[in-house]
Image (spheres, rainbow, N blue to C red):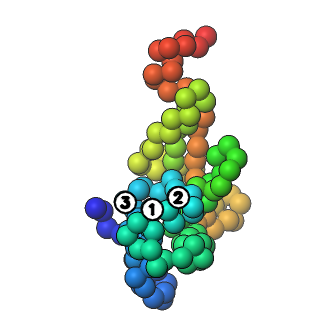
Amino acid sequence: MKSNFLLQSLKDNGHTLTRPRRAICDLLLECGGHLSADQLVEKLQIEYPEIGRMTVYRTLDLLSSLGVLRAVYQGGGAAHYILLEGGHHHHLVCAICHRVIEIDQCLLQDATEQISRQYRFQILGHLLEILGVCEQCQAKTPLN
């Protein structure tokens, strides 16, 4: 498993690394984010039945306030939380099959620097979703 940047962020910002916080952060990393709070609670209950729903919600809120996690709403229902390692997260989303393709590298570094200068805005992070049609769906339904 890669380094737990979530725990490091908590530690760097003076927060206690409690057993529940460690378990929540480890599970978020293990799953790559993309979990709702309820899904996270359900998975945690298997190994950590003592961790309550409110602890999960408070930890998600704390991680979000630190800029390492972000709630996203994709098509209704509960928010799903995504990891913002390095302050960014990028997706390609297929409009037909709804497949989500993760883009690992940041393609917006120059753009965010320009926006920051032009608008005198300190950018803490960003989330990019590009809607399109994946290769498999294009093969099934050629677009004109």
Q: Quadrant of residue 38?
A: bottom right
Mark 1 crowd level (few <14, some 14–19, many ≥20, 10 Å Cα): some
Locate the C terminus by quadrant.
top right
Q: In the depicted view, which residue is nearer to us: 5 or 81?
A: 81
Question: What kind of element bears circle 3?
Answer: helix
Q: Residue at x 56, y 34 (%)?
A: 98
The answer to which of marks 3 and 1 sits earlier in the sequence is 3
Residue identified by numbered label 1: 43
Mark 2 crowd level (few <14, some 14–19, many ≥20, 10 Å Cα): few
On screen, residue 48 versus residue 93, left or right, reads left
Residues at discs 3 and 2 in contact (Cβ within 8 Å): no
The extreme left residue here reads 1
Query: Percent position (x, y) of residue 73?
Result: 66, 51
| Label at residue 75 | none
Residue 125 visible in this rendered orientation of the protein: no
Label 3 or label 1, whichever lies nearer to me, is 1
Residues at discs 1 and 2 in contact (Cβ within 8 Å): yes
Does 67 appear above or below 89?
Answer: below
Q: Residue at x 48, y 77 (%)?
A: 51
| Label at residue 30 | 3
The answer to which of marks 3 and 2 sits earlier in the sequence is 3
On screen, residue 19 versus residue 37, left or right, reads left
Does 138 appear above or below 125?
Answer: above
Residue identified by numbered label 2: 39
Instruction: Inspect the image, locate mark 1, and give the three-letter code of the amino acid beneath it.
Output: Lys
Query: Percent position (x, y) of residue 50?
Result: 46, 79
Question: What kind of element bears circle 2?
Answer: helix
